[in-house]
Amino acid sequence: MIIPPYLKAGDTIALAAPARKISQEELIPAIALLQREGYSVHYDERLFAEDHQFAGTDAVRTAYLQDLLNDPDIHAIWCVRGGYGSVRLLDKLDFRPLIKNPKWICGYSDITAFHAHLHSRCNMASLHCTMPINITEKTLETPAVTTLLNALQGKPLYYDLPSHPLNRPGNFSGPIVGGNLSVLYSLAGSNSALSTKGKILFIEDLDEYLYHIDRMMQNLKRAGMLKHIAGLLVGHLSDMHDNAIPFGHTAEEIVAACCAEYDFPMRFNFPAGHLPDNRAIRLGCEMEISGLTTIQRATTA
């Protein structure tokens, strides 16, 4: 596993928009945060390109992101928001410069496409974390921001998980992979699909119908992505929808039912996903879960 170098004051963090468009005004608090922490911030006018809901055409977004991957003086790329569009760039990008000069790719939600691709095709760690669109003056001192900075700086990450009736006991450890369930489901069968054997699988999702959660979990099961994992870590499953005739189970119950035939440990309500308490996870790196305590120590290549 390639672990990008951790950051220090004076390093450069670039902002990228591989999916939905964003305005310069929306980035003011996040840029101020990075500068407060002693980082240089890099972007150019292409960051604010527009093509309907996208941050510019596929060609514009690809060229801009390729320039960031190529630049050895950039130490991390922080994706400004999710939405949809990252998957459209994967096969257009040349990741060889990133392997030569590793840097942290940061974000969540739609950015799961990059996390999965980096893990499966580049054997590289990345950072599942809050994004600039979520940064406001009121969120600067929250655990989401604190863990983002700690993760980038190579500090250990400690989390105390809440108890949950669907938790399955057992301590477990291993490299953690995953992200947004809908995106992981969409990558099944492609060269970006995750290999999960012996790893901790993390999932989270937002704004889905309950039957679709079942459909996606059945897909992961049939694709063999659940059979040999070290454990399952379930983050926020928020703002779910139901049909006029109820599905009959919560999203968490659906996940647990799909895993009933396996004996790996499970923990629910991990504080990551589409809620303000979205704490950072270094994907691809080792994590230890003992009881309700989660530890991710700083690791290097």
Image (cartoon, rainbow, N blue to C red):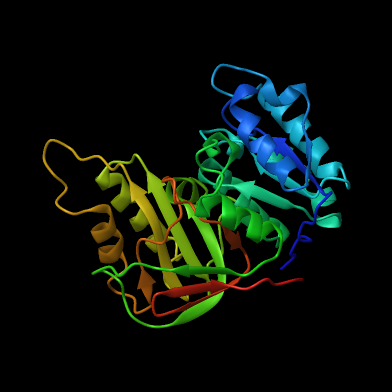
- Residue 59 x/y as whole percent: 72, 25
Q: Is residue 75 left or right of residue 180?
A: right
Task: Name the residue at 48% across, 72% down.
Answer: 294
- Residue 40 x/y as whole percent: 80, 41
Q: Quadrant of the C terminus?
A: bottom right
In this view, 218 is above or below 176: above
The answer to which quarter of the image holds residue 54 is top right
Task: Name the residue at 34% across, 39% down.
Answer: 207
Q: Is residue 214 left or right of residue 87?
A: left
In this view, 78 is above or below 153: above
In this view, 23 is above or below 238: above
The answer to which quarter of the image holds residue 140 is top right
Q: Quadrant of the N terminus?
A: bottom right
Q: Is residue 248 left or right of residue 166?
A: left
Instruction: Give whichever of 201, 139 is nearer the camera.
Output: 139
- Residue 259 x/y as whole percent: 32, 68
Q: Is residue 159 left or right of residue 33?
A: left
The answer to which quarter of the image holds residue 7 is bottom right
| Residue 121 visible in rendering | yes
Instruction: Give whichever of 166, 217 is nearer the camera.
Output: 166
Residue ranking furthest to the left: 245
| Residue 228 visible in rendering | no
Task: Name the residue at 55% across, 36% down.
Answer: 137
Task: Name the residue at 61% across, 54% down.
Answer: 148
